[in-house]
Amino acid sequence: IRQSASVLDYSVTMETRLVDMLKSSPFYADFLSGVQLASCRPDVTWEDFPQSLRKALKDLGLETQLQNAIYHALRKSPWLLTPSVPLLQRKEPLAYLRRAQSAWQRRLSKSLNNTCQDLDLQLSCRRSKASKEAIMEHWEELSTLDTDLEAVRPVFSPKDFLEVISSIHSPNVKSLPTKSKYSGLTRVPFKVTTLQDMSVKYKEILTLPEVGTNERRNQLAEKVLLTAHSQIAREFVKEGCPQSYRAKMWSLILGVSSGPKEKQSYENLKQSVLDYDILMDQLILKDIRLTASNDDQYFVFEDVLCQVLLCFLRDTSVLAHFSYSCASPVTGLLQNTDTPVAYPPCGVIPFHGFSMYASPLCFLYSDPVQLYTVFREMYVSYWYKLHSLSSKPDGILCLCVLFESLMQNHEVKLWEGLQARTIQPLRLVFKWMIRGFSGHLSVDQVLLLWDMILAYDNMTLLPLLAASILSLRRDNLLLAPDQQTAEAVLADLSSIKVMPLLNLVFKKIKSD
């Protein structure tokens, strides 16, 4: 009896936490309004109120909306299913990684302050009337604004972050294996998945059909969209997503829309861009110029990227992801007050290449509001894990460990051959992984890769693909005398086809 009561108490506690989270979300007000309208329908009777109301909710699609809301809440906050734990442990259970992340954030804060001093700029200030009018006039062509960005430098680059990752070691392990000339850059004893386990997890890739040529898949995509169910959409995309349905399917998987509320929210963010000038504006504009604007595939989207990313910097709703991220926003005090506020308002400090998280989405969404809502949700679901330190299985630290494990176990000759010439394989591929391969693969291949990230709700394909590319270029890499030559061998990935390459890897494992 005592055990049953314990289970019951735990269940009630979990439900209470979940209900509280849903009540504080934007979903709740619309859902409650829908329930009130449903209860007024003539087919909802007092005599059979629970059953008739539930049928009405199902007919109106409100039951599916609630299921999706619960699904996304539990996906982002799995701690809801467990007894309450301290916030710090919920964000990151390992103390030494919390310390490493805190040290990294202090370094970013110092770098930000130095940037302010070097450029003689304020972190934030109201725009002058002339500046505001110039942005209003050029909103659709922000790239043409006469902005001097020559002296602007990124707060950090992927190379800087990799150096931090390679310096981390666990104090909980008394004696790690002696560092040999063939050891990698990562020094944390994480248990990562094996290639055999991955071949089971991603088994659908072995039988992936030719997407876009199968009329049956197109018809099935229509039916999936009609269900409006996120989990069904995920399962569908595992077997390939027709290109013409990708935009709608991604929105459904992520649980985002672009209705009147989203449009108004975007307009409010746009107004904030017009009203306030922040240092981050220059950093993000410089990043767009250095990356997307110099890319043959993305340069045509320079203006819309400027709009979307300037709005993102001011979106305080992004701060919610820090409740489940190991990171915390940089904070400062409002002028003449003791009130701490996040800086920038979204809490995210962009690095060199940050704009590439949004660039591929420009091929899917012509409406800036749709583009923005999908980009924001993808960031708070996935991309934040690629530039913060955590023990999450698909956080960048574990992905680096997984990459080196795959190379050491399945490409021994290549691994030792590169190491013998002091070429670290992780240095060759880290810039690919931290961007989700955006800006390195051709756009269609990036979108196929991101299909799989969304379908499996996981990013462990990133290190597998990186290792597979090195394996594909093995012969040329073994002839490379130094790091620079090895990087030249891997400079052009435009010929890489993601799914055939992964399919080949899994088939090889299956045959072995």
Image: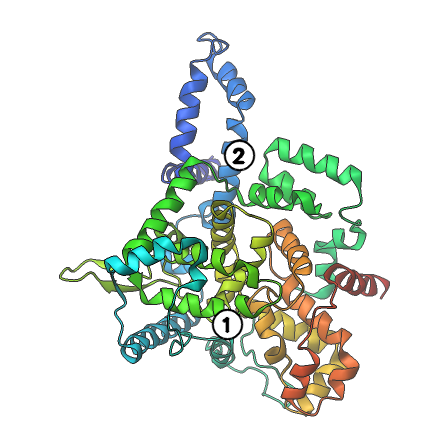
- Residue 15 appears anywhere in the view: yes
Give the amino acid at mark 2. Gln
Q: Dots 2 and 1: beta carbons under 8 Å? A: no
Mark 2, Cα crowd under 10 Å, few <14 / some 14-19 / many 20+, is: some
Q: Position of residue 128 (x, y in %)?
A: 24, 60
Residue 489, compared with residue 256, is above or below; it is below
Q: Residues within 10 Å of mark 1 (few under 14, many from 20)?
A: some
Residue under pointer 1: 290
From the viewer's perspective, is 349 left or right of 466?
left
| Most foreground residue, 79 or 220 | 220
Q: Residue furthest right?
A: 511
Distance in Å between CA atoms under marks 2 and 1: 42 Å
x then y, percent, for residue 31 = 43, 29
Please say if 352 is above or below 234: below
User: Label 1 amino acid?
Assistant: Leu
Name the residue located 70 percent from the left edge and 76 percent from the top edge. Answer: 407
Q: What SS does tag 1 mark?
A: helix
Q: Position of residue 355 (x, y in %)?
A: 50, 63
Q: Residue at x 13, y 62 (%)?
A: 336
Residue identifier under label 2: 67
